[in-house]
Image (cartoon, rainbow, N blue to C red):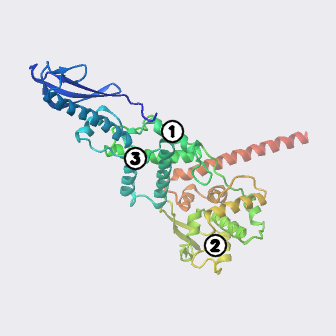
Amino acid sequence: MRNSNTLKVLIFTRDTSNNPEKLTVYARITVNGKRAEISLKRYVSVNEWDEKKGRLHGLTHKARLLNSYLDEVYGEIMDTHKRLLREDKLITAQAIKARYLGQDEAHKTLMELIKYHYESQKNKLRPGTMKNYYGTEKYLKRFLEHTRRIQDINLKRLNYKFITDFENYLINGPDLQKGKKCTNNGAMKHLERLRKMVNLAVRLEWLDKDPFINYKLHFHKTERSYLTEREITRIEETSFTGAGYEKVKDVFLFACYTGLSYIDVRELEKNQLVLGIDGNQWIYTKREKTSESVKLPLLPKAKEIIEKYWDSPETDTKILPVLSNQKTNKYLKEIAKACGIYKTISFHSARHTFATTVTLSNGVPIETVSKMLGHTKLSTTQIYARVLEHKIGEDMQNLIEHMQTKKAAEG
């Protein structure tokens, strides 16, 4: 059953004026043991009232009129309950009473909250961030439709179970997009966005308490995939017959030498290539994700790739011919395999490669790397430094093992 509330309606009398000849008639609504009472503004004497039936005795004109009215009251209360159920409202005795009396203030719903969030934040949040919120909205709608057969839900019905059910749906539920379900971290990002909107509802006093209060987001640590110098060289020295593969290879290597993301490389215009304060060529751009300005001196290998495509009719005002993100990542996997690189790489691996192998490994200060990557916080860049420490530890362990093997061979 979708709703397990227990509803009872009792018509009874109460002596409110110390006069047994003028008892007030009430309707008592009980839901799950909690009561709400409505004075019906009707009065009877103790001798006229049938307490067991909740109606007047006899068939007098007065009895028939009042009993008919009480039947209507009973029916309207039951209909009110049904309407609230159809609207997927929170069912309480007070909610039924308020709706019956026309005093209920319509409770805000999840979709109303999402709409308010959009209207209030659309000029504050970046387009990429808003796009992510649209994704969360889409999954919430599918979750409601697939698991509850509703299109919206009262905010007051959000609770710990709703949150965990949504999490399970994202990770284990029906395929959400092109056969792919959410990873754990993907699901956590959707829940993180839902929590931010719920916190907004609490601040607006649309919710009395935070349903996330006992829920903890649990992100899994992920390895940041990057290429070593040897792997970069292997890709550079491998030629590909397909024009698309060669373009993807060059654009990827360009990102390895600049640290720019896919979207930033794709949007890069020729007029953003300028002479820097040192007289060398620099790229002046702005990160799409954070709107942070990036000033980046060009390394020779990045410059060579630009020159290769400068006069190409495919580029026009753009610096490089960039294929779709989906096709780029598909080709990259095949390029890695052809080069004997058996690690999972995507276009974003180029950015990680720039941070670790190209810059930090070669002594570029972390503050400088942070500026070139367009990070708003140094702590974001420090993640790469920890990766580098891990790599150094592995390299030293390999050296120790090599020295021990050599010593054993000599002995």
Query: What residue is shown at x 17% (from left), y 25% (from top)?
Result: 59
Q: Secondary structure at mark 2?
A: loop
Q: Amino acid at mark 1?
A: Asp
The residue tagged 3 is: 110
Is residue 182 placed above or below 319 in the rendered structure?
above
**Sequence order check: which comes first, mark 1 or mark 2?**
1
Whether residue 112 appears in this view of the structure is yes
In the rendered view, does 191 fall on the left or right side of 281?
A: left
The residue tagged 1 is: 165
Is residue 300 placed above or below 142 in the rendered structure?
below
**Residue 321, which numbered label?**
2
**Sequence order check: which comes first, mark 3 or mark 2?**
3
Q: Amino acid at mark 3?
A: Leu
Residue 52: horizontal and vertical position, in percent? Answer: 25, 19
In the rendered view, does 271 fall on the left or right side of 344?
A: left
Between 7 and 63, the residue placed more toward the observer is 63
